[in-house]
Amino acid sequence: MSLLPPSLRASIADDAGFTSGFLQSFLLILACELGDRTFFVAAILAMKAPRITVWAGALSALAAMTVLSAVIGKAFPLLLDRRHTSIAAAALFLYFGLQLLRDWWRMRKQAHTENEELAEVEEELAAPEKKPKGSRFPAFSPPFVKALTMTALAEWGDRSQIATIALAASKDLYGVILGGVAGHAICTGLAVVGGRLLASRISERAVALMGGVLFVIFAMVTAGGYVE
């Protein structure tokens, strides 16, 4: 590597940083969003409105939140030393990982019950409403606006948003953004296609275990600087 021209070495480093940020952000979103509130919001709204409209509205909100979170995270190294922000990010990942693993352990003896997140979202959306008239422009239709606003409210302060901020503090900005948006696009797509059925098949305990392990790995990688 030392024999390569400086410009080529910089290009390779940039590509590796982008790939690392993309993959970690993508996996992080999959671990956080499957079975999360935003997942169920899209799943339930898609039962009463066109799926593509709900998908577009929810994804618009999630993409905007991802960009905002990544920019906030990228601003931290400008205020603090990069080493300190990496340590803080690793601590956050470890905290979330241990929290999920704790949930997984506590659920080991529980009988299968309805997902609590799903029940809460269903209750919030249970209020009767008039069937909206169709709109020539989907972006201005009530289902689109409802999917966008409810998803944004559900995502604000969520685990995935905080984790995205932490990841962007130590990884490539564009990689984190594109990986996060790609992960949200897949999760939201699964939700609108068959979220209610999928929710009944997904084990909350399995999701907690998968997410906990991934977060712990992210903590070790971020703290050790193995992927740059």
Image (spheres, rainbow, N blue to C red):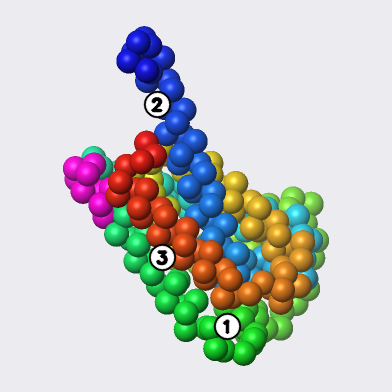
Q: Nearer the viewer, residue 135 or 15?
A: 15
Span shown in magenta? 79-88
**Residue at the spot of label 1:** 116
Give, as a three-letter code, the residue at label 3: Gly
Q: Is residue 206 left or right of residue 95?
A: right
Residue found 41% across the figure and 53% down from its top: 218
Residue found 42% across the figure and 55% down from its top: 217
Q: CA distance from mark 2 to mark 3?
A: 28 Å
Q: CA distance from mark 1 to mark 3?
A: 20 Å
Vertical comparison of 146 with 4: above or below: below
Give, as a three-letter code, the residue at label 2: Ala
Q: Earlier in the sequence, mark 1 or mark 3?
A: 3
Residue found 29% across the figure and 59% down from its top: 91
Binning the other alpha carbons within 10 Å of mark 3 as few (below 14), some (14 to 19) or many (20 upward) gives: many
Q: Nearer the viewer, mark 1 or mark 3?
A: 3
**Residue at the spot of label 3:** 97
Residue 207 locus on image (x, y percent): 57, 69
One can see residue 60 in this view = no
Give, as a three-letter code, the residue at label 1: Glu
